[in-house]
Amino acid sequence: MMKLFDFFSTKDFSKNASKIYAAVVNQARHPDFYLDFGVPDTPDGRFDMILVHAILVLRRLKRDHEKTADLSQEVFDLMFADLDQNLREMGFGDMGVGKRVKAMAEGFYGRVEAYEKGLADDGTALNEALERNLYRKTSPSPSQTAAIAEYIRDQARHLDTVDIDRLATGNLEFGPPPARLKGAK
């Protein structure tokens, strides 16, 4: 039986897309998100942290769409190929993986919309989107949610200053990870 996303496994992703996606995953794995900021240290929590960072990068690439359309698509495809592979390693079969990847893609697009609205609004829209998506069934403290929202805004501002030609060569450096949050647990 052919895998639903078999084309991902044979696609040769560019070195630049691979470097960008590796930076996204590395930043998403920062322990403070899980230890101090209350992000669930679960497959869902880690998935959501990857999405947060990928959305920020794809948002930046979109600003220079004419230069970066192919790269942006490669980063997106690589992310979902990786998610597909991770589900298979967790023991899901072809049918289960297909359904889960479809749900993940729908979740991705919903988060893009919610986070874009939240970044455009200086109010609480981003915090609410994070409580709904990133934290899901957990109950973070208001300071944890506010700190993650501010971190995301800081990263968006930082990425807005990154030279697109540098980013297009796979050179992605996020701003510093969040400082430890004192007494927020």
Image (cartoon, rainbow, N blue to C red):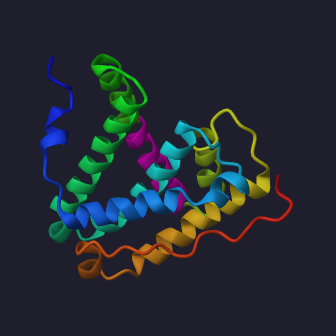
Question: In screen coordinates, is 67 left or right of 26?
Answer: left
Q: Indicate whether 89 appears above or below 141.
A: above
Is residue 7 magenta-colored?
Answer: no
Rendered location of residue 51, percent (x, y): 44, 49
Q: Indicate whether 126 appears above or below 94.
A: below
Q: Residue, x 40% and y 56% (percent of image)?
A: 54
Q: Indicate whether 168 appears above or below 37.
A: below
Q: Indicate whether 111 appears above or below 155.
A: above
Question: In screen coordinates, is 176 left or right of 21?
Answer: right
Foreground residue, 136 or 16?
16
Rendered location of residue 9, percent (x, y): 18, 40
Rendered location of residue 32, percent (x, y): 66, 60
Is residue 112 magenta-colored?
Answer: yes
Asked where in the image residue 4 lies, by quadrant, the reply is top left
Foreground residue, 121 or 28?
28
Q: Residue furthest right?
A: 183
- For the N terminus, the quadrant is top left
Q: Residue, x 55% and y 63% (percent of image)?
A: 152
Asked where in the image residue 7 lies, by quadrant, the reply is top left
Q: Residue, x 17% and y 61% (percent of image)?
A: 14
Foreground residue, 42 or 120?
42
Is the stretch drawn in magenta largely helix, strand or loop? helix
Rendered location of residue 65, percent (x, y): 21, 65
Q: Residue, x 24% and y 73% (percent of image)?
A: 168
Q: How many marks?
A: 0
Highlighted range, magenta: 107-120
Asked where in the image residue 123 lies, by quadrant, the reply is bottom right
